[in-house]
Amino acid sequence: MISTDKLNKYGEILLWGLQKARTKKYKQNDNILIRFDLSAIRLAEILQAKILDMGMNPILRMSSTPRMEKNFFERANNKQLGFQPSGEKEFNENLHGAISLLAPESITHLRHIDPGKIGKAALARKPLRDILWKREDKGDFGWTLCMVPTQGAAETAGISLKQYTAQVIKACYLDMKDPVKGWEETFNNAMVIKKWINRIKVAYYHIESENMDIKITPGEKRRWIGVSGHNIPSFELFISPDWRGTEGVYYANLPSCRDGNYVEGIRLEFKNGEVVKSSAKKGRDFVAKQISMDKGARRVGEFSLTDRRFSKIDRFMANTLFDENYGGKYGNCHLAVGMSYSDTFDGDPSKLTKEIKERLGFNDSALHWDIVNTEDKTVTACMKSGEKKIIYENGMFKY
């Protein structure tokens, strides 16, 4: 249980993140969605009050409970899987911000559901998400999210709720007197690294670890971004590469929890930019079905690095928000199969048409699945000039 004082701090951090995540400033009467799991209702109440005090309109929506999700996927036919209530398109077209409060009471409750059904529902929701991505590219929409500790998450992570809560408090700076100031400092430190890495003229990155040997090609008109307010916590710096230049083997040694499934030891082999072979120590069939969701699900949408000097996260948390920002002894890299992020375009994202995205190798998919490697690794930047330079080693950027 997080104290009321710390929940108030959490609320202040989330509002800082929401404002950082949008290029245009918010104004009076803007519409802000607060989507929350039942166990996060106290934080939702705090945010509602703060947003009202700011003169904006909080819109509260509770997410489905685990039982509701099970009911839906067990009973829904194909038409019901794709059903969207009337007015959702108009709702998204008039939304200015969104804060998601994740508090999963159960992590693996959908493990018996056919991943194909989950994929159909995700594909049906994609046009609604695309509206928000386009609004974000224009600076008209911003979003952030966080996670509130629950017993279900702690059990899946293999620790007590007390230990789990302590990790959340530490990672999100809730133990600081002025956590917003702490996040502002992290934001500024990350900015220094982003300016450095974006000056390097790279043909491709070569990532090597005990179980991994892969080439990631950034492509043209790309920039590294991150620590932008979108996620609390967030320490990763990332790029959406040209998917066509991915070659080699990627391995995720950190487990992953997705759509109620627990997956461990994912290994993906890429040729000509696409996964040609996949395996996993646990959840092999689930992995195969996820990367078959649509044409883009077999391609890379994101590559990320986290500097261990920033992140205080040092264990598996059974939650992607925390796991993709793992610090520990060697930091982490993670790769996402599926959708690319338009804001990694080195230009005005609102000018990115479908044709330009295809020409530059930005990937499109209903899937975006972050899988994490925490092994000791070396990342070498292979320059367009032919020179090679190690940019990441021992869990740290070498800038």
Image (cartoon, grey):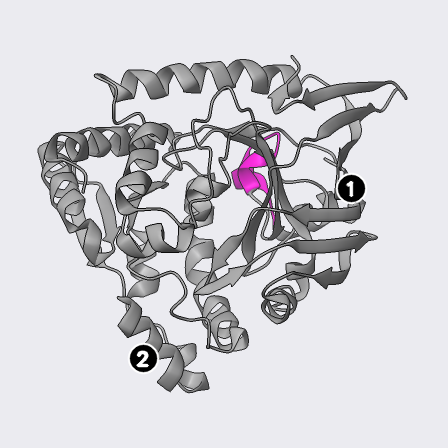
Is 286 drawn above or below residue 241 in the view shown? below
Residue 71 is tagged as 2
State the residue lying farthest toward the right. 386
Residue 214 is tagged as 1
Q: Secondary structure at mark 2?
A: helix
From which residue to which does the magenta span run? Answer: 342-353
Which amino acid type is marked by label 2?
Answer: Asn
Q: Residue drawn at (36%, 86%), measured in percent from left and top?
A: 75
* Callout 1–callout 2 Cβ contact below 8 Å: no
**Quarter occupied by residue 107:** bottom left
Question: In the image, is residue 344 part of the stretch drawn in magenta?
Answer: yes
**Quarter occupied by residue 70:** bottom left
Is 67 drawn above or below residue 199 in the view shown? below
The tag earlier along the polypeptide, 1 or 2, is 2
Q: Residue drawn at (31%, 39%), measured in percent from left and top?
A: 163
Residue 61: where, in percent of width, then height? 21, 57
Which amino acid type is marked by label 1?
Answer: Ile
Q: Can residue 306 be seen at all in this image of the molecule?
A: yes
**Toward the viewer: 60 or 280?**
280
Residue 92: where, in percent of width, then height? 33, 55
Residue 318: where, in percent of width, then height? 43, 50
Q: Can residue 95 be seen at all in this image of the molecule?
A: no
